[in-house]
Image: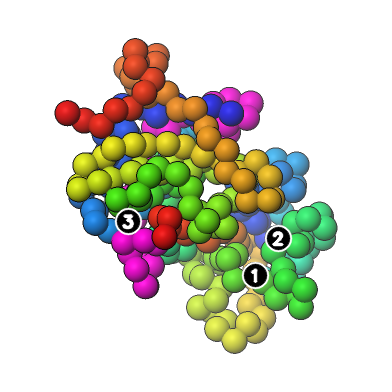
Amino acid sequence: MVAELVESALSDLRNLCETAYPLEACGALLGTGDGDLSPWRVMRVIPTPNRHGDDKRRYFSISPELQLAIEREAEHAGEEVLGYFHSHPDCPALPSDCDRTHAWPSYLYVICSVVKARTVGIAAFAKVSQDGTLLPVPVTPTDPVNQSSLESPSWPSRS
Amino acid sequence: MAVTILIPTPLRRFVGGSKSLEVIAETVQGALTALADQSPELHQQLFDDQGHLRSFVNVFLGEDNVRDLAPAGGAVAVHDGDVLTLLLAIAGGAPT
């Protein structure tokens, strides 16, 4: 279970999460692969409004109507909705109890930790059983032009 | 009526990995029941113990959310060639 994230998608992810700060950003991950027989390959991210009604600093939810539009968009582009991303403002890029409760098997979940409007960590997870466990998924930033992994597999915050 | 149901990625493992299935039904509820009959696990994912569609499962008939078409949970008729899209609610949050 591994994932690749093309450089432009990684850059967009950071920008979206930093722009949304101090609120949680959220959206979909589109690309190819299934994380099982072939690696997830995230080609792009599609942001969605955070429609959570209570505390957008701590929670997010995505409108089903927007999910449908994203599914249509992915199908039109010959891609799959691989999973979803959201940010953790001023919190680490680790799944919360809420994340575990709402996670679905077979989806890739990317969490972006943002502190003072700067990305300080990005991590990916997947649910492999019904007990709520979210396992870390190794993610490699990838150069879409060369179709190869970049030199550094770690993602330090931007300088 | 022959209806196509588009299956979200997390539920495809219950139907042999298929992205879509065709069922014969007269209503949305009937179509979902026909789908759920293929797997007890899938039935449990879609319906609660009272047979009601779980709150985190959203169903679209074409571009229309079925909950908007029948707010009280009444029957929604389907027609030959209709497409139902199943979607699972997406939510989460930061540690508190």
Q: Of tags 2 and 3, which is closer to the observer?
A: 3
**Among numbered discs 1 and 2, the one appearing first in the sequence:** 2
Vertical position of residue B1 compared to residue A100: above or below: below
Q: What is the crowding at mark 2: few (fewer than 14 residues within 10 Å), some, or many (at least 20)?
A: some
Q: CA distance from mark 3 to mark 1?
A: 26 Å
- Look at the numbered discs 1 and 2 and tell me whether their residues touch, using CB distance below 8 Å: yes
Residue tagged 1: B54
**Direction bottom: furthest residue:** B72
Residue in the image at 36% along x and 23% along y: A154
Which subunit holds the residue at mark 1? B
Q: CA distance from mark 1 to mark 2?
A: 8 Å
Vertical position of residue A46 compared to residue B76: above or below: above
**Residue A107 place in picture, x, y as percent:** 55, 43
Q: CA distance from mark 2 to mark 3?
A: 28 Å
Q: Which mark is residue A24?
A: 3
Residue B16 location, quadrant: top right
Residue tagged 2: B45
Which of these two is toward me, A82 or A103? Answer: A103
* Amino acid marked by disc 3: Glu
* Coloration mode: rainbow
Vertical position of residue B21 compared to residue B29: above or below: above
Which subunit holds the residue at mark 2? B
Which subunit holds the residue at mark 3? A
Residue A52 among magenta residues: yes
Which of these two is toward me, B8 or A7? Answer: A7
